Amino acid sequence: TISGDSASGNGNNGIYLTNGSETVIVSGSVMDTNGLNGIQLDASSGDSIINNSLSGNYSTAIELNLGSNNVRIASNSITSNRFDGIVLGSGGVNTVDVTGNVIAGNGEYGVWMSTASNRIAVRNNQIRSNTQTGIRIQGSDTNAIFQNDISLNATGVQITFSSFSNVISKNNFINNTD
């Protein structure tokens, strides 16, 4: 468990869990102004990222890659990162629960499900004022986007590159420009 810590101003990631770092809980911590990401998981499963503050990171607040599966991302404040709030990225990221977060003011996407990010649930989040898209689903299947407030983004939700069987239900779309 990593709790109540500050991982700020680092040249790379604030926190980096990799190669079998399993069932780690990161909670009540601050990860800001890092040279890359606030927190990155590579090949790390069963982890929880709960009730943290992630802002002003050079790239992304939270990035999951390379088979980081069964992860819970809940009740975080994810704001003002240079590119993205949350990236569920390369190498197959599956079964992730993104719930109850405030994801706002990021330079590109609020939540980006990149190639082969499947069985992701994005629910009960406030996703607002991200420069490009609130939620981008790219080449990813069988995801559920429901009961989110998605507002003031350039585009609320974008689905692209052969994404199949995604469900978008009971969201509030307010004042997105596209």
Image (cartoon, rainbow, N blue to C red):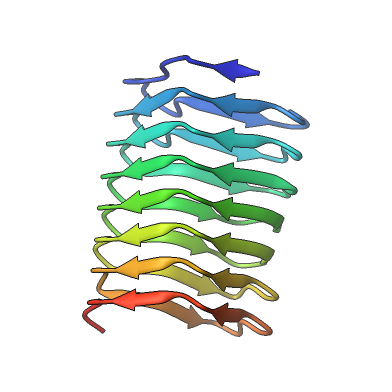
Q: In the displayed structure, would residue 105 be above or below residue 39?
A: below
Q: Quadrant of the N terminus?
A: top right
The residue at the point 75 percent across, 40 percent down is: 45
Front one among 59 and 22? 22
Left or right: 173 in relation to 136: left
The residue at the point 40 percent across, 27 percent down is: 31
Front one among 75 and 88? 75
Left or right: 175 in relation to 92: left
Tell me residue 150's x, y (percent): 36, 68
Tell me residue 144's x, y (percent): 62, 71
The residue at the point 55 percent across, 44 percent down is: 74
Specify whether residue 167 is in view: yes
**Residue 55 in which image quadrant:** top left
Left or right: 40 in relation to 67: left
- Residue farthest to the top, as pictured: 5
**Residue 47 in which image quadrant:** top right
Total numbered badges shown on the rendered structure: 0
Specify whether residue 133 is in view: no
Tell me residue 134's x, y (percent): 37, 67
Q: In the displayed structure, would residue 64 be above or below residue 168?
A: above
Q: Quadrant of the C terminus?
A: bottom left
